[in-house]
Amino acid sequence: MVDLIEKFLRTFARRGRSIILAYDHGIEHGPADFMDNPDSADPGYILKLAREAGFDGVVFQRGVAEKYYDGSVPLILKLNGKTGLYNGEPISVANCSVEEAISLGASAVGYTIYPGSGYEWRMFEELRTIKRDALRFDIPLIIWSYPRGGKVTNETAPEVVAYAARIALEVGADAMKIKYTGDPKTFSWAVKVAGKVPVLMSGGPKTRTEEEFLRQVYGAIEAGALGIAVGRNVWQRRDALKFARVLSEIVYGNKKVVEVLGGQS
Ligand code: FBP
């Protein structure tokens, strides 16, 4: 069996690190997320941005992939999603199969779990089928591991994020996306307990200043993360391409925040 972690790295970390542009917000949060930079409402703009920035991949839901994906940047097809209109126990169910994702051009599939939710069993059950199909079709599975509901009171608390990382390893992730804990020391524990599975830091809401986000990214890389899977902190900025290039200097170029900000900080 081909090692699916290796396969993930070959496509999504060609330079040894990874930046993936997440764009499943149309379902998760709705079009309000596109208002800061109205160009971002157009998936074609997102593809062009990822391509011109030299990013390693994009994340789309099936409908966006069907209508817009052109093969110019590797695709992670997000198999499940929930809306911001829903108000019950956290749950996200698949609206696309692994086989369909492959037919849409995906090089990896993504699935969110909400450990802690009263429905965690439902997502784990569905994940079992998805994992089986991912193995059968030889495609990497990336898990968005976001503890939520139940006993979780703070989603970014270091012990919660570390638990999220370990759960993703335990259930068969070939790469994972977890929230940042706020500092490299605690994030490095999450990276450690993720074992062999590469860790991508989730971007989160757009920070007040660019520097704030760059420091998070630098901290995650310092902690041993493979890279980042980021949405709003890139495409909500009016000068998204410029910011994307600055991010690249940190993630791929090992630059420090003060260096890329040119003495602004
Ligand atoms: P951001 O970088 O914009 O936070 O995107 C990462 C992501 O995981 C998206 O893939 C997803 O749509 C969103 O965050 C979900 O965020 P949440 O469930 O925390 O509101």
Image (tube, helix red, strand yellow):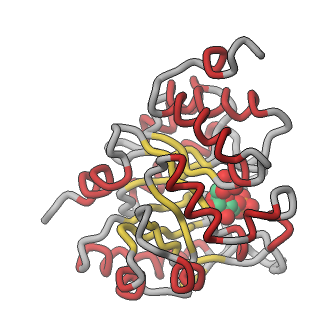
Q: Quadrant of the N terminus?
A: bottom left
Give left or right: position of 137 versus 99.
left
- Is there any visible trace of residue 147 in the rendered image? no
The residue positioned 36% from the left and 85% from the top of the image is 103
Q: Please name whichever residue, 39 or 100, is drawn nearer the observer in this view of the structure.
A: 39
Give left or right: position of 260 versus 39.
left
The residue positioned 66% from the left and 55% from the top of the image is 231
Q: Please name whichever residue, 199 or 129, is drawn nearer the observer in this view of the structure.
A: 199
The residue positioned 70% from the left and 44% from the top of the image is 156
Q: Residue 194: image x %, image y %?
A: 42, 44
Q: Quadrant of the C terminus?
A: top right
Q: Residue 234: image x %, image y %?
A: 68, 48
Quadrant hosting residue 228? top right
Q: Please name whichever residue, 14 or 140, is drawn nearer the observer in this view of the structure.
A: 14
Query: In which quadrant of this rendering is ligand 1 seen?
Result: bottom right
Q: Residue 259: image x %, image y %?
A: 61, 15
Q: Please name whichever residue, 60 or 1, is drawn nearer the observer in this view of the structure.
A: 60
Instruction: Please determine whether, in this image, residue 159 is positioned above or below residue 98.
Output: above
Give left or right: position of 135 versus 130.
left
